[in-house]
């Protein structure tokens, strides 16, 4: 088992009204915004109950997301400014801030015992649309004996990344990013592990993701919200609707 390090979590969040547009066939804009907010609450709750996590920052320019983060005791960090902004640039800025300002209580000292030789906190990047994530999922990432640990999304993306203390990697989040992150880590001579856990693999981006999430046992704010919104029945009706003529294919 790897040595335990305190963990600081970074959670990137888009403006609630702008996210989850691929759920438009299933949910109204207002419902999608509420879903994004509720999923963030579930992720923050998961991190708050995870023993290894000693700090959380939400990376966002959205006022509602920032207020929710503060309500949960998290720090708020700004998105990277345009024109060079975006998810990866925002996370790079947040990670740089963390390395500069939060070396952590677990820092190791050099041979003279004079100054930290390497920062003592691991950095966890976890997306805000993982309502099934549990503290056990976070513990599984921390337990891996590798310098970089990736949680693969069901579609090949990267839903979470753990960087051991003193380790950095250019971020390449986006479609099929897990393979890109693996390749970049190996090219840099870093050990890398990939985990596939149910709570970390399913992000709610598409109607079929929502259906898969609803089929799971469990209890969360997000699950309660989807039932209150009548999404299970709406999803069944959408699934039973005949395909348009141009979308039909021979079986």
Image (spheres, rainbow, N blue to C red):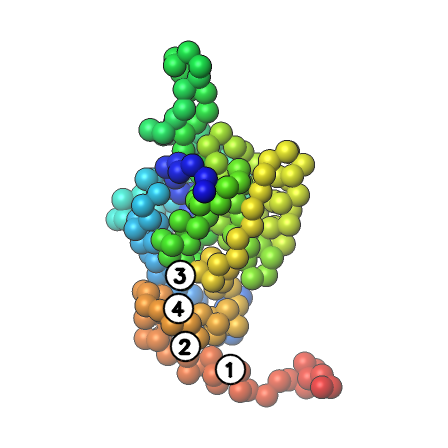
Question: Which of the pair 190/92 is nearer the observer?
Answer: 190
Q: Position of residue 238 (x, y in %)?
A: 51, 82
Name the residue that disc number 1 marks: 238
Q: Position of residue 9 (x, y in %)?
A: 40, 43
Name the residue that disc number 2 marks: 231
Q: Position of residue 12 (x, y in %)?
A: 45, 47
Place residue 187 in its image quadrant: top right
Name the residue that disc number 3 marks: 131
- Crowdedness of circle 4 by 10 Å Cα count: few (<14), some, many (20+)? some
Give the mark nearest the N terminus, 3 or 4. 4
C-alpha gap between disc 3 and disc 2: 16 Å
Quadrant of the snapshot with the C terminus: bottom right
Quadrant of the snapshot with the N terminus: top left
Q: Secondary structure at mark 3?
A: loop
Give the mark nearest the N terminus, 1 or 2. 2
Nearer mark to the viewer, of 3 and 2 = 3
Image side of residue 85 versus residue 224, left or right: right
Q: Secondary structure at mark 4?
A: helix
Question: Which of the pair 116/84 is nearer the observer?
Answer: 116
- Crowdedness of circle 3 by 10 Å Cα count: few (<14), some, many (20+)? many
The answer to whether residue 114 is above or below residue 73 is: above
Residue 31 is marked as 4
Give the mark nearest the N terminus, 3 or 2. 3
C-alpha gap between disc 4 and disc 2: 10 Å
Q: Position of residue 60 (x, y in %)?
A: 42, 45
């Amino acid at each position: 088992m790897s040595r335990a390090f305190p963990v600081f979590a970074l959670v990137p969040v888009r403006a609630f009204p702008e996210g989850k547009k691929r759920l438009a066939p299933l949910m109204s804009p207002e419902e999608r915004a509420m879903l994004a907010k509720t999923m963030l609450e579930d992720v923050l709750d998961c991190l708050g109950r995870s023993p290894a996590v000693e700090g959380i920052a939400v990376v966002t320019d959205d006022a509602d997301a920032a207020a929710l983060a503060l309500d949960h005791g998290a720090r708020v960090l700004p998105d990277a400014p345009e024109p060079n902004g975006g998810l990866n640039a925002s996370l790079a800025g947040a990670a740089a801030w963390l390395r500069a300002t939060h070396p952590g209580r677990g820092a190791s000292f050099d041979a003279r015992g004079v100054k930290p030789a390497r920062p003592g906190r691991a950095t966890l990047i976890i997306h805000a649309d993982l309502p099934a994530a549990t503290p056990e999922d976070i513990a599984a990432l921390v337990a891996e004996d590798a310098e970089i640990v990736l949680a693969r999304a069901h579609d090949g993306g990267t839903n979470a990344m753990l960087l051991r203390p003193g380790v950095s990697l250019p971020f390449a989040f986006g479609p099929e990013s897990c393979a890109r992150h693996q390749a970049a880590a190996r090219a840099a001579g870093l050990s890398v592990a990939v985990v596939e856990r149910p709570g970390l693999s399913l992000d709610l981006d598409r109607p079929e993701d929502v259906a898969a999430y609803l089929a799971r046992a469990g209890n969360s704010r997000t699950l309660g919200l989807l039932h209150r919104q009548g999404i299970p029945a709406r999803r069944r009706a959408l699934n039973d609707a005949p395909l348009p003529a141009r979308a039909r294919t021979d079986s």
